[in-house]
Image (tube, rainbow, N blue to C red):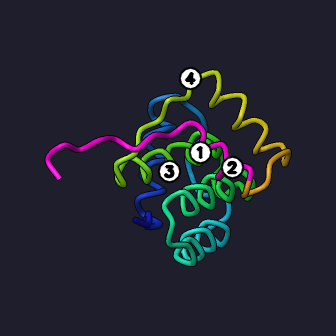
Amino acid sequence: MYLSYDEIVEIHNLQISHYGGESGTLNHGNLDFTVEMQTRFTDPFEVAAFLLYNIATLHPFCDGNKRTAFMSAYLLLCQEGFEFNATNDDVEIFMFSVASSNESQKSVQQWLETYVTKKCDLLT
């Protein structure tokens, strides 16, 4: 349920290669902190909210922090069987709010819970 340092860097690299921007890690310590501390949580929404909030606000990368933050949370929740119902506009507005320090980690979790649904797997 957790993302590794290398997985988050790969998510970042994919975002930069697809959308543009400056690649590279600006603060390895902030990324190390985020990767290590995510394991304090056991609920996938808590983990996803922690990743999204910390990557967006601690700016571990030179560019693309908001994109990397959202995609990290998105992919983690997808791995847990959830899917997003938010529009691109919903995501963009919310991510700017997070990066501007207008949101708390708790409000990030509430937003995720609002825009995510559990997929139904009829085979289980």
Q: Nearer the viewer, mark 2 or mark 3?
A: 2
- Residue 33 lies in what quarter of the image? bottom right
Mark 2: amino acid: Val
Cβ–Cβ under 8 Å for marks 1 and 2: yes
Rendered view: 2 above or below 101? below
Please, what secondary structure does the residue beneath circle 4 have?
loop
Which callout, 3 or 4, points at the residue further toward the start of the chain?
A: 3
- Circle 1 residues within 10 Å: few <14, some 14–19, many ≥20: many
Mark 1: amino acid: Leu
Disc 1 versus disc 4: distance between alpha carbons?
Answer: 13 Å
Q: Is residue 84 magenta?
A: no
Residue 112 percent coordinates (x, y): 59, 45
Which callout, 4 or 2, points at the residue further toward the start of the chain?
A: 4
- Circle 4 residues within 10 Å: few <14, some 14–19, many ≥20: few
Q: Which residue is mark 2?
A: 108
Residue at 56% in and 36% down: 115
Q: Which residue is mark 3?
A: 72
Residue at 56% in and 71% down: 38
Q: Which residue is mark 4?
A: 87
Mark 3: amino acid: Ser
Residue 76 percent coordinates (x, y): 43, 54
Q: Which residue is mark 1?
A: 112
The magenta-colored residue range is 107-124
Which callout, 2 or 3, points at the residue further toward the start of the chain?
A: 3
Mark 4: amino acid: Thr
Front position in the image: 38 or 26: 38
Please, what secondary structure does the residue beneath circle 1 have?
helix
Which callout, 3 or 1, points at the residue further toward the start of the chain?
A: 3
Please, what secondary structure does the residue beneath circle 3 have?
helix
